[in-house]
Amino acid sequence: GQRRHKVLGKMSAAREDRLREAGFIFADAEAILRDKNRDALWDEMFQLLLSFKEQEGHCNVPWNHKENERNLRNWVLRQRRNKVLGKMSAAREDRLREAGFIFADAEAILRDKNRDAL
């Protein structure tokens, strides 16, 4: 359809203008593309977290740590914040928990202390 052509970049500017003048709304298509990009970025960062875990044996990413030039620590903090604010889907929460991710900083500190004692 028209939205798909717009998202894929297969629509001329003139056609888009005519459709907008006729009242056609592209917002759904733009939101779908934005959500797909957001999901792809989340998946990419999750894979970097799994790589970190494979190397380090845990998901407690230290300050300023980068994986493939991406600031993984900031992403981890954002996941904790999203969980607290109720902005995280159950599916993402499940994936993170299955990977061994700890949502509370206090839990992460306690886990580190226990690991250091071993």
Image (cartoon, rainbow, N blue to C red):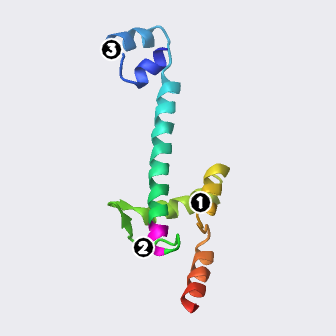
Q: Is residue 25 magenta?
A: no
Q: Which mark is residue 12?
A: 3
Q: Residue at x 49, y 56 (%)?
A: 46
Q: Secondary structure at mark 1?
A: helix
Closest to the observer, 57 or 86: 57
Other residues around mark 3 within 10 Å, as few (<14) / some (14–19) / many (≥20): few
Which residue carries the number 1 mark?
Answer: 96
- From the top left corner, tell me how far across and down residue 42 is, in percent: 49, 50
Which residue carries the number 2 mark?
Answer: 63
State the CA–CA distance, disc 3 to disc 1.
42 Å
Residue 97 can be seen in this image: yes
The kind of residue on which mark 1 rests is Leu
- Which one is earlier in the sequence, the residue at label 3 or at label 1? 3
Q: Secondary structure at mark 2?
A: loop
Which secondary structure dominates the residues rendered in magenta?
helix
Q: Is residue 53 magenta?
A: yes
